Image: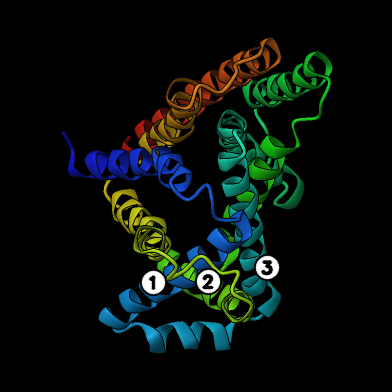
Amino acid sequence: MNRGVVLALSAYIFWGLQPIYWKLLREVPSIEIVAHRALWTFLFAALLVTCRGEWKTLFRKIRNSDNKRLLLAPALLIGSNWIIYIWAVNAGFIIETSMGYFISPLVSVFLGVFFLDEKLRRMQWLAVCLAGAGVLAMTVIYGQFPWISLYLAGSWGMYGFLRKKSPLASIEGLTLDTALLSLPVLAFLTFLTATGNGSFLKDWPTSLLLAGSGVISALPLVVYVVAARLVSLSMIGILQYIYPTLLFVVGAFIFNEPLSAAKMTGLIFIWIALAIYTIDSTIVFARREVAFKG
């Protein structure tokens, strides 16, 4: 098997199984888990940047950026995404998180239409409409708007959109995002420690899990970045659905979350939409490859 495919699979499998890790911290408030995740991810990412000798490059890109707000916004998006995601996992809504990450690629398509004036092909419009029908079906049958799924899809899609427009590479961007989050995070964790409400250092298993949150957040991203350089865009597009599929399996079969008719109906619509979108994108990409070689 191609080395890039193996690395991409490893990253997506790692991400897909992460809820098992967060469940080990279910007794810790979600906001505190995210605070530690941001802090330890920054320390891990900063170590990588140091080892690669890229601090000067990072500071130069930040200094030369024409739009500083473009560098600040992703930190808010990734921070809020982490908060909702970890809360949802530990509150028993893993299936909802999987639906969010199934929808996310279609959100990215939609962002391209509205902000980059991209034109959708007929099959892409069909896929987006089917996904919308799935959300509507869940709302009507379930009687509740699937806000968790849509917020995760929207925040992750917008984060990816802003990252593409940013001059920073993936590791550089993660370093800056978590550095910005670490400023309020340090104040918050200091307050928790001073008031005796913090979970860190109260017992070793919890402390090690909180410290390890940085590694499990940054390491799969590093692996993914390497993989993305070794495999085609169409292959990455297909493999990306391993992540939400594993989230679904973990939620439904490991933690026995209820799979209601509303969720199943919505998922069927979304899966059909993704199948249409993926097949259409693969065919178009293959045609372009043939035309380029010709």
Image position, residue 31 (x, y; %): 63, 60
Disc 2/disc 3 C-alpha distance (Å): 12 Å
**Disc 1 crowd, CA 10 A, few/some/many (<14, 14-19, 20+):** many
Disc 2/disc 1 C-alpha distance (Å): 9 Å
The residue wearing badge 2 is 178
Q: Kindly indicate the quadrant of the structure image that contains residue 40.
A: bottom left
**Disc 3 crowd, CA 10 A, few/some/many (<14, 14-19, 20+):** some
Of residues 70 and 36, the one nearer the viewer is: 36
Q: Amino acid at mark 3?
A: Ala
Dots 2 and 1: beta carbons under 8 Å? Answer: yes
Report helix, strand or loop for mark 1.
Answer: helix
- Lower position in the chain sequence, tag 1 or tag 3: 1
- Lower position in the chain sequence, tag 2 or tag 1: 1
The residue wearing badge 1 is 45
State left or right for residue 235 relative to residue 96: left
Report helix, strand or loop for mark 3.
Answer: helix
Report helix, strand or loop for mark 2.
Answer: helix
Q: Kindly indicate the quadrant of the structure image that contains residue 97.
A: top right
- Classify the position of the C terminus by image quarter: top left
The residue under the point 53% across, 77% down is: 179
The residue wearing badge 3 is 73
Reply above or below: 176 against 9: below
> Could you tell me if residue 169 is visible in this image?
no
Image position, residue 259 (x, y; %): 60, 16
State left or right for residue 206 relative to residue 162: left
Dots 1 and 3: beta carbons under 8 Å? Answer: no
State left or right for residue 266 relative to residue 45: right
Q: Amino acid at mark 1?
A: Ala
Q: What is the number of the mark on residue 210?
A: none
Eye-nearest disc, 2 or 3: 2
